[in-house]
Amino acid sequence: MKASPSLLSKVELFTSMRQIFFALSLFVLLFIFSLFLQYLQFQKLTQFDDYITEVYVEKQYKKKNYWVLKLQSLEGFSFYTSSKDNLKNLEGQHLSVRLFINDLDFLSYLKGFYLPSQILMGLEAKEKRYSLMQDLDRLHKTSTSAVYKALFYAGSIPPSLRNQLSALGINHLLAISGFHLGVLSFILFFLLRSFYTPFQSMLFPFRNAHKDIAVLVFILLFLYVYFLDFVPSLLRAFTMSVFAYTLYDRGIKILSFSSLFLVIAFLISLFPKLIFALGFWFSVAGVFYIFLFLHHMKNLKPWQTFILIHIWVYLAMLPIVHYFFGSFSIAQVFSPVLSMLFILFYPLSLFMHFIGFGDTLDPILEYILALNLLVIEIFIPLYLFIFIILISLLAIIHKFFFYILFFFNLVLLGYFFYGVT
């Protein structure tokens, strides 16, 4: 009888330096090819002084006396522009625009860029998900509607709401990523198993039901990613999920740093712009610290792991986040608790909207979003940021550095509390 991979001890992804070198060589070649494709698009864009393209408005918000627009070209690139015109809400609307190319270099193109533009005409087409967002606007108040639009359809978050979420330390909960995809995967797997397993046992018992359901789940998740127009954070999470399942199905150890490194290298080789995507590196750091916790805390009970891993990730990410963003309030100490509760809130809110009672949880959201919090700005210096990165890497090798990292971040949190009080 053939043994199942789940019954065997998982093997490491790489077993020799030759394998590592071969994998790196493939990724370098793939990265060069992907970068070449990006350069061809850049040359096409900058060939003349102006460029006409069809776009849709991904994000629109007011800044001082002008509008800031994030536009997604149907040719595959996105950029920011601005307008002093008295614009209506254009989010999701397709437009024909003329771009004025002024000294745009390839590095700026990869990092994300701003171009002045002129709207030539509005087109009849509108992205379907933005039409569905309007249904949420009719059901909820502005703030709660923005929350649900971000959760369900990767909608943009207004700056005022984003500041409140930063004060609460829950910005990451509204950016659709691997966390949300994991919850959706669990729901879909549970529902499909209820329907599929009885038919499978009667009609084709020779098939592996779990594998079949996993494939169906990935197909449905891909359709969701496609519907949201391949939102970068969701696309990254989906790619990582498929990659992780492929390793698991072949009996390869998933919770290993070599596997994480392979996924990161694979994603960057496919999407070179990720090198400059701060959100990507935040997600990488989050997964890294989860792996670090599970690597050193293997003997905990499941309920202990569930609670402590949320506290650990919050503390571990504290200096990383505060090198780039300064907002801090006392309420952020409840971030691990809110993250745990979110695991219940997200599927429940989905279900309530599905059965027509989507506004049931609004009073709770409105109360949280209306809290008047004292917020201060604290940034950590570069040398501390580098210190944290080095200690984090050393923690892979020895548990002593894991504890050093924990206590340092605990002291840092105490210093932040002192600054507030």
Image: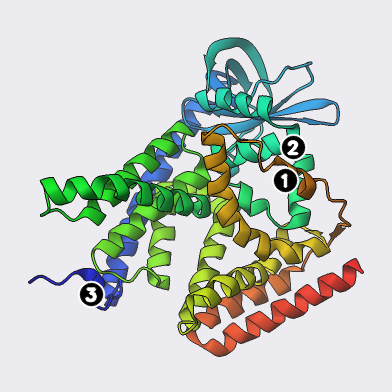
Q: Residues within 10 Å of mark 2 (few under 14, many from 20)?
A: some
Do we see residue 107 in this rendering?
no
The vertical placement of 222 against 255, above or below, is: above
Residue linked to disc 1: 365
Q: Quadrant of the C terminus?
A: bottom right
Which residue is outermost to the right? 421
Q: Residues within 10 Å of mark 3 (few under 14, many from 20)?
A: few
Q: Mark 3 and mark 1: span between their CA atoms? A: 44 Å
Badge number at residue 414: none
Which residue is outermost to the bottom? 400
Image coordinates for residue 317, horizontal then vertical, percent: 65, 66
Q: Secondary structure at mark 2?
A: helix
Q: Amino acid at mark 3?
A: Leu
Q: Disc 2, disc 1: CB below 8 Å?
A: yes
Q: Secondary structure at mark 1?
A: helix
Image coordinates for residue 207, horizontal then vertical, percent: 14, 53
Disc on the earlier residue, 2 or 3: 3
Relative depth, front residue between 235 and 347: 347
223 vs 405, left or right, is left
Q: Disc 2, disc 3: CB below 8 Å?
A: no
The vertical placement of 80 against 269, above or below, is: above
Q: Secondary structure at mark 3?
A: helix
Badge number at residue 143: 2
Q: Amino acid at mark 2?
A: Ser
Q: Residue at x 51, y 88 (%)?
A: 398
Residue linked to disc 3: 7
Disc on the earlier residue, 2 or 1: 2
Q: Mark 2 and mark 1: span between their CA atoms? A: 9 Å
Do we see residue 189 in this rendering?
yes
Q: Mark 2 and mark 3: span between their CA atoms? A: 49 Å
Mark 2 or 1, which is nearer the eye? 1
